[in-house]
Amino acid sequence: MLDQNQLLPKSVQHQVNRALVSMPTLYYDYDFQRWQTYFIMSFSNEKIVKRSHGLAMETNGRGGESMSAPGLISALAITLGLCLGGAALAIGPLRRFIQNRFMPAPGEGPSDESVAKGRFTIHVIGESHLPENVENSCSGNAAKPVRALAVIEGGDPGYGETCRYLVEGALCLVKSEDQIRNENKIKGGVLTPAHAFGQILVRRLLDRHVKISVSEL
């Protein structure tokens, strides 16, 4: 689980640098103009994204996932809390104490009211990679990388939206099987949602009031 490239297809594993899981970091992001700290779900999310790129035979990209904090103090508190929490969970007796005292029991979860109030916003910045000495075919000047911003907004990310995405993914298979077969360039194997459903899932989510917008920076 510590290997960031664990889910990469074997055919491309030799083409990428080996890396352990990203550790909690703290930095200021000038694009968002906010302090960033470690996002706990990046532990698994980044592996899925890497597999999507690997299935497309793209190995020269890089990226990461972080969480915005209101200010430096809160970012420091979150980072320190995650480090201490991770260390505590690595110790058996402490882990069992935390689980029994603070963690919800199986079947427990937030109230319907809490789920209804939940919201999330994700900002994704992508930048194209250009080889050196590439010129713009029109102006003759050095070409600039293309930068784009995607914004995804939805309801409660833990329970509400998870159920929505699972159901919409299943409905893609039920109602759009032929379209998936025609649009999907990768046949068979263990696919990520991006390759299994592609734009078909995106269109279904847009129809269900999930907001997705893309703009050039």
Image (cartoon, helix red, strand yellow):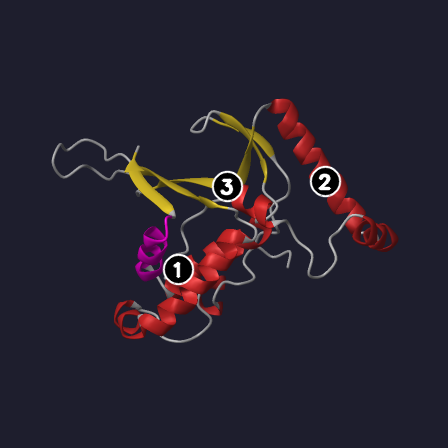
Closer to the chain start, of discs 3 and 1, is 3
Residue found 14% across the figure and 33% down from its top = 140
Task: State the residue position of label 2.
Answer: 83
Which residue carries the number 1 mark? 194
> In whole angstroms, how far apart are the C-alphas of marks 3 and 1?
23 Å
Say which label, 2 or 1, has the lower sequence index.
2
Residue 89 image point, x, y percent: 78, 50
Which residue is drawn at the image coordinates 29% and 37% (left, top)?
A: 215
Quarter occupied by residue 77: top right
Q: Which residues are magenta?
A: 199-209
Residue 145 percent location from the top left of the image: 30, 37
Residue at image location 35% in from the left, 45% down from the top: 212
Amino acid of disc 2: Cys
Indicate whether 93 appears above or below 125. Answer: below
Q: Which mark is residue 42?
A: none
Residue 35: name its quadrant. top right
Q: Which residue is mark 3?
A: 119
Above/below status of 122 relative to 208: above
Q: Amino acid at mark 3?
A: Arg
Reading the chain from its start, which is encountered first: label 2 or label 3?
2
Q: Residue furthest right?
A: 93
User: Given this view, does label 2 or label 3 mark the residue nearer the observer?
Assistant: 3
Classify residue 179 as left or right of residue 85: left
User: Closer to us: mark 3 or mark 1?
Assistant: 3
How many numbered discs sit on the rendered protein?
3
Q: Nearer the viewer, mark 2 or mark 1?
A: 1
